[in-house]
Image (cartoon, coloured by chain):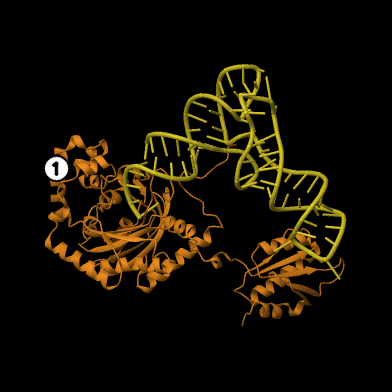
RNA sequence: GUGACUGUAGCUCAGCUGGUAGAGCCCUGGACUGUGACUCCGGUGGUCGCGGGUUCGAACCCCGUCAGUCACCCCA
């Protein structure tokens, strides 16, 4: 029978890797806790309609990247390609939004059917925060600060740069898109196929084309800023002032356009050049119209999402994962001779009860002393407890050996094993 | 979705122009040694990603397919 393998772009995270992940998860949770955000969990599967109505019918994500299918009832469902839509749906459905302020965070797998490459997978993990019910630029600044705090904690602050832009209100963009669309149509023969396809359906996406010919043709194109309302501009400049006051550096990128339709006014991205082509580690912004668009009472909002794979990749390549995170156990028990299985299990039980915080592996499966000792060293444990007697003899003493360069060992009565362990591991009870 | 490269033991790889597969590491048994070592001897482990085709014969050629890597595209 052919061997089964994982689905393309869906990764197994093996024991050697999980410590890095746990490290990032712990940092993230510590940061959002400091800012008073509360965790929300919502399903991986939603009605396809939810994503169409929030992310946008003509976005790449909805058009060609969603995992959609009919379930047994004939309902069309999709694996979530991002978190915001589900978060809004859940929060609104349970009455968390109307006339309230909410600071929420979530974490979990997202799914997009893209061609996998470095930092881009079909199942990937996102962390995100969403803040509801706060209209001023102060919450925009706070959301950005949350992300900046995480970079600080992870030691990445020098490897990420913040880009921001003001994309105006939905109304502003509608007027601008019409003007841009007309401009592009006039210059259609200077564009490539991709740009021509989008010039009516989603003209703003043409702006960040990497094709030099297209960029050349865009010279003289209408500029979004000219279509943005005064109110929006005031909000944006206040945000910039706030960021400066808390010492967050940023660059303004007039071409920064988010790929999800629900964003408005201030949007931002954190990018790095240490990841190859997938430089965006975190992206977000305001989405004041989304709640109403999904059928709720109008509620302003802002948030971001970050890709955990990309963070872990960065941390690994930059050597920013502390070594201690992969430490698993403290003590390895070497058991020579099958007749000692009982006494070994009993001693291990007693030690685990007395020292619930330490990790102790009781060697199973037999094997000769030297091989067990090798495992003890490779396990990363600090101490080995050696159980060994002549056949037919009672086990009265055990040996505790330091697994460092000294290799020192002491022989002690089994009853005193716990005391000696506490001393060697500096455990105060 | 497009393109380039790749896919041989658990791991890293070799295998010349086609003749049914090797090395090192790992694991394991033993010898030696006051005992994670070194050295020596032995052992386990592969339907050569999968499926077709060409051939007397394919890991090596052809087609398809799956997966990996990177880039385009897109985004976290």
Instruction: Using the rendered image of the protein, determine whether residue A334 is visible from the camera's viewpoint.
Output: yes
The residue tagged with tag 1: helix, strand or loop? Answer: helix
Q: Quadrant of the N terminus of chain A?
A: top right
Q: Is residue A338 left or right of residue A309?
A: right
Q: Quadrant of residue A362?
A: bottom right
Looking at the picture, how far across and down is residue A77, in whole percent?
35, 47
Q: Quadrant of the C terminus of chain A?
A: bottom right
Q: Quadrant of residue A296?
A: bottom left
Looking at the picture, how far across and down is residue A274, in whole percent?
42, 55
- Out of A240 and A422, give the one closest to the viewer: A240
Q: Is residue A20 left or right of residue A216?
A: right
User: Residue at label 1?
Assistant: A183
Looking at the picture, how far across and down is residue A80, in whole percent?
36, 52
Q: Which chain is yellow?
A: B
Looking at the picture, how far across and down is residue A121, in whole percent?
43, 48
- Out of A222 and A264, give the one closest to the viewer: A222
Q: Quadrant of residue A37?
A: bottom left
Q: Residue at x 62, y 67 (%)?
A: A329
Instruction: Using the rendered image of the protein, determine whether residue A100 is visible from the camera's viewpoint.
Output: no
- Mark 1 belongs to chain: A
Circle 1 crowding by C-alpha within 10 Å: few under 14, some 14–19, many from 20: some
Q: Is residue A336 left or right of residue B2?
A: right
- Out of A137 and A148, give the one closest to the viewer: A148
- Out of A224 and A318, give the one closest to the viewer: A318
Q: Please count the marks in the image.
A: 1
Q: Residue at x 23, y 41 (%)?
A: A214
Chain A's colour? orange
């Amino acid at each position: 029978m052919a061997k089964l393998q994982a689905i393309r772009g869906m990764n197994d995270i093996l024991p050697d890797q999980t410590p890095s992940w746990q490290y990032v998860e712990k940092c993230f949770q510590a940061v959002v806790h400091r800012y008073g955000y509360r965790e929300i969990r919502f399903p991986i599967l939603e009605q396809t309609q939810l994503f169409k109505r929030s992310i946008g019918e003509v976005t790449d994500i909805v058009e060609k990247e969603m995992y959609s299918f009919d379930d047994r009832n004939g309902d069309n469902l999709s694996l979530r390609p991002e978190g915001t839509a589900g978060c809004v749906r859940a929060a609104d459905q349970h009455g968390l939004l109307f006339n309230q302020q909410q600071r929420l965070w979530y974490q979990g797998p997202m799914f997009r059917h893209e061609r996998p490459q470095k930092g881009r997978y079909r199942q990937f993990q996102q962390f995100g925060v969403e803040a509801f019910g706060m209209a001023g630029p102060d919450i925009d600044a706070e959301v950005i600060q949350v992300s900046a705090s995480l970079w600080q904690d992870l030691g990445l602050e020098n490897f990420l740069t913040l880009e921001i832009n003001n994309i105006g209100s939905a109304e502003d963009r509608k007027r601008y898109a019409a003007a841009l669309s007309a401009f592009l149509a006039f210059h259609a023969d200077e564009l490539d196929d991709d740009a021509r396809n989008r010039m009516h359906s989603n003209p703003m996406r043409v702006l960040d084309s990497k094709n030099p010919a297209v960029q050349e043709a865009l010279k003289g194109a209408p500029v979004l800023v000219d279509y943005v309302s005064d109110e929006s501009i005031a909000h944006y400049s206040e945000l910039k002032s706030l960021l400066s006051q808390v010492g967050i550096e940023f660059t303004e990128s007039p071409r920064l356009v988010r790929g999800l339709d629900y964003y408005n006014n201030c949007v931002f991205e954190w990018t790095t050049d240490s990841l190859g082509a997938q430089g965006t580690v975190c992206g977000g912004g305001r989405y004041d119209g989304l709640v109403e668009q999904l059928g709720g009472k109008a509620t302003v909002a802002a948030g971001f999402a970050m890709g955990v794979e990309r963070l872990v990749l960065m941390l690994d390549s930059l050597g920013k994962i502390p070594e201690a995170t992969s430490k698993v156990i403290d003590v390895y028990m070497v058991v020579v001779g099958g007749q000692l299985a009982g006494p070994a299990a009993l001693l291990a039980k007693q030690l685990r009860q007395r020292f619930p915080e330490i990790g102790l592996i009781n060697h199973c499966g037999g094997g000769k002393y030297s091989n067990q000792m090798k495992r003890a060293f490779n396990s990363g444990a600090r101490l080995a407890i050696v159980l060994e007697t002549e056949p037919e003899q009672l086990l009265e003493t055990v040996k505790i050996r330091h697994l460092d360069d000294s290799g020192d060992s002491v022989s002690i009565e089994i009853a005193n094993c716990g005391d000696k362990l506490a001393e060697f591991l500096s455990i105060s009870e």
